[in-house]
Image (tube, rainbow, N blue to C red):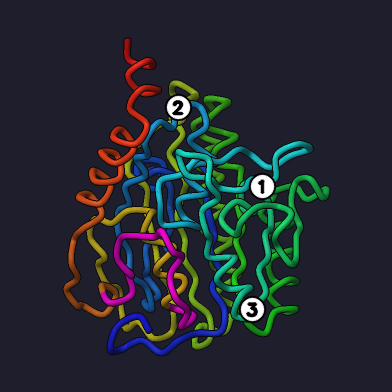
Amino acid sequence: MGGNHFRSVNKVLLLVIDGMDCVNLTMAHTPIMDGIHGKTAVGVAHTEVLGAGAAITPIAHAMMGTGYNVIAHRPGKVATGRPYDYHGAPVETVGEVAREAGLLTAAVGKNEAAIVLGGSDQVDLRRLEMDGVDGSDDQVLSREILHILDQMDSGILVANYAAVDMMGHRKNVSLLIESVEKADALVGKLLESVDLEKTLLIITADHGTNPYTGNHNTAPTPICLITGQIKGRQNLGVVHNLEIAPTITSALGLRRPKQAFGRNLLPLAFGEKTEYSYHIQLEEQLEELYRLDQPRHLQQHT
């Protein structure tokens, strides 16, 4: 249930601020995400993935939903965003676990939000780019998030705010900083309307976007857990975005996805010690990948 001190919540809102690494965050004034109001646990998250390449964004979102290193493609006219393992088998997501238990799942904003929940064809409620929603407009996004939350008695809502990533690709530092500050204001608006005794808000990023090169990077990203059950401002330390999946399911009192590893981060928010294991498990997964599919990987490296 997320540690001795945590009571299960009815809803989890995962807000992915696309492209916001720790450098981009520190350049902006972000009192809400910094946890000045309390009720917050903050940390630094690794986002490194195996074989990401140009597809880092969909893969990173899939990892948040599966707790496992995966392959995924951006949802669109052809792809639904279904996560698969490196052998082509579907990987269970937090969305499937939630729907199995009778909870609703919803995706808002940039299309990648749906990947966390199993793909754009799997979610119960959907307000994405493909549905005409501007995922880079903080006002539109906040309105859509709150509208869907009002329709959910219990479940998971994943939202992706795209403006930081867009400004990074345009190499516009000042507008990138402005976008980060708009993201902070968006979080503040959500906190005014969301019942934090019944809702866990997780703020994270899929990767960083460097406004000097215009490219994605794998710099550490911020992560923030906000709930009325946290007292003051707590330190999560160094974590991994893989650990978002078991944190979501633990918060809702559900089982974790079948292939997920890493820790439930909620005990850290209450000062408890947990086993630090995701590095070892990533290495074991990579070794197993090479062992089972050695000819293909040898061919790629010759």
Q: What residue type is labelled 1?
A: Lys
Q: Residue at x 22, y 60 (%)?
A: 237
Q: Is mark 2 on a helix, strand or loop?
A: helix
Q: Which amino acid does label 3 sit on?
A: Leu
Q: Is mark 3 on a helix, strand or loop?
A: loop
Q: Mark 3 points at which residue?
A: 103
Residue 9 % position (x, y): 50, 85
Q: Which residue is drawn at 52% across and 50% down?
A: 17
41 left or right of 10 in image: left
Above or below 282: residue 198: below
Residue 252 among magenta residues: yes
Q: Which amino acid does label 2 sit on?
A: Gly
Residue 73 % position (x, y): 60, 38
Q: 59 or 181, which is in the foreground?
A: 59
Residue 182 % position (x, y): 57, 53
Residue 276 is labelled as none
* Res 225 → quadrant: bottom left
Nearer the viewer's eye, disc 1 or disc 3? 3
Q: Is mark 1 on a helix, strand or loop?
A: loop
How many other residues sit within 10 Å of disc 3, few (<14), some (14-19) or many (≥20)?
some
37 left or right of 72 in image: left
Give the distance between the C-alpha atoms of the residues marked 3 and 2, in whole angstroms. 34 Å
How many other residues sit within 10 Å of disc 1, few (<14), some (14-19) or many (≥20)?
many
Give the distance between the C-alpha atoms of the residues marked 1 and 2, in whole angstroms. 20 Å
Residue 4 among magenta residues: no
| Range covered by the magenta-colored residues | 251-267
Nearer the viewer's eye, disc 1 or disc 2? 2
Q: Locate the N terminus and report the quarter of the image it occupies.
A: bottom left
Sequence-wise first label, 3 or 2? 2
Q: Name the residue under label 2.
A: 53
Q: Mark 1 points at which residue?
A: 110
